Amino acid sequence: MTSKPYVAVAEGVTKVFKNGKLEVQALRGIDLSIEAGDFVALVGPSGSGKTTLLNLLGALDQPTSGEVELVGQRLTKLGKAQRAKLRLGSLGFVFQAYNLVPVLTAAENVEFVLELQGVGKAQRRARALEVLGELGLAELADRRPNELSGGQQQRVAVARAVASRPKLVLADEPTANLDTDNAEQLMQAMETLHDEHGVTFVFSTHDPRVVAHASRVVRLVDGKITSDERREER
Ligand SMILES: Nc1ncnc2c1ncn2[C@@H]1O[C@H](COP(=O)(O)OP(=O)(O)OP(=O)(O)O)[C@@H](O)[C@H]1O
Ligand SMILES: [Mg+2]
């Protein structure tokens, strides 16, 4: 597997979940290469395997067979601690339910990841405020999550995900809990981060308006990729 130009590669990936005697074939042979600078929408019906694939690309879970390579490292060759280190150093995550720490302010939520990475206090404060500013949240830096709207909380979550300049940001239905306006704002914020800072995103969604922002659309059906299209205009 040559990996240099790719931030993530899945090769022949399958995933089987076993619940007692019941086996679910969640992924049935996925080949997918994510390039630096990609802005990918992962679409497909409920149960088609989107979350499962994102979890594998994010080194949060392991394939039943096949190989996932992240920033040039084969995940099967890494132990649990090494995978955690890889996640912290190279990946950003955005979840459906924001997942901010309730007792921390917006800025502190963003700084938290930088602190784990060993970034000094002054530098992480500056970086947090810079990223929050880019997402239109400069005024809200000192508010706690319960003092923010859902849309604002999710933009803080995106700020947190990109603050450490990860190689790849994975977002599982980031707009699922947002109304149309907030979903649009979030997508525009992600698009700006992509266009101006080259942030690589892979996000899953059910919403055609969210898909419209993508420059590449990967469609999953029954655990298989049925189409993978690049688009020039959006
Ligand atoms: N931990 C698990 N144990 C057993 N089965 C699972 C588990 N996680 C997922 N599955 C099954 O694997 C298949 C793919 O699920 P997945 O969550 O990846 O789909 P999805 O495309 O994200 O769906 P949705 O759009 O509803 O979020 C489904 O049949 C699901 O029931
Ligand atoms: Mg899902």
Image (cartoon, helix red, strand yellow):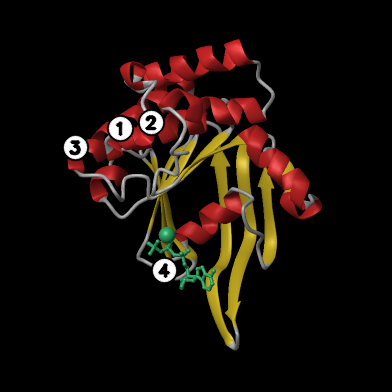
Note whether residue 81 is visible.
yes
Instruction: Indicate which disc residue 147 carries.
Output: 1
Q: Residue furthest bottom?
A: 21
Residue contact between numbered discs 2 and 1, judged by CB atoms under 8 Å: yes
Q: CA distance from mark 3 to mark 1?
A: 19 Å
In the displayed structure, does residue 104 sit left or right of residue 73? left
Return the disc, 4 or 1, that comes first in the chain's sequence: 4
Task: Report the residue marked by disc 4.
Answer: 47
From the top left corner, tell me how far across and down residue 147 is, in percent.
30, 32
- The label nearer to you, 3 versus 1, is 1
Dot 3: within a 10 Å radius of its alpha carbon, few (fewer than 14), some, or many (20 or more) residues? few
From the top left corner, tell me how far across and down residue 133 is, in percent.
38, 16
Q: Give amino acid for label 1.
A: Glu
In the displayed structure, does residue 177 sit left or right of residue 48? left
Q: Residue furthest front?
A: 103
Note whether residue 163 is visible.
no
Point 53% across, 57% down: residue: 53
Q: Give amino acid for label 2.
A: Arg
Instruction: Indicate which disc residue 181 carries.
Output: 3
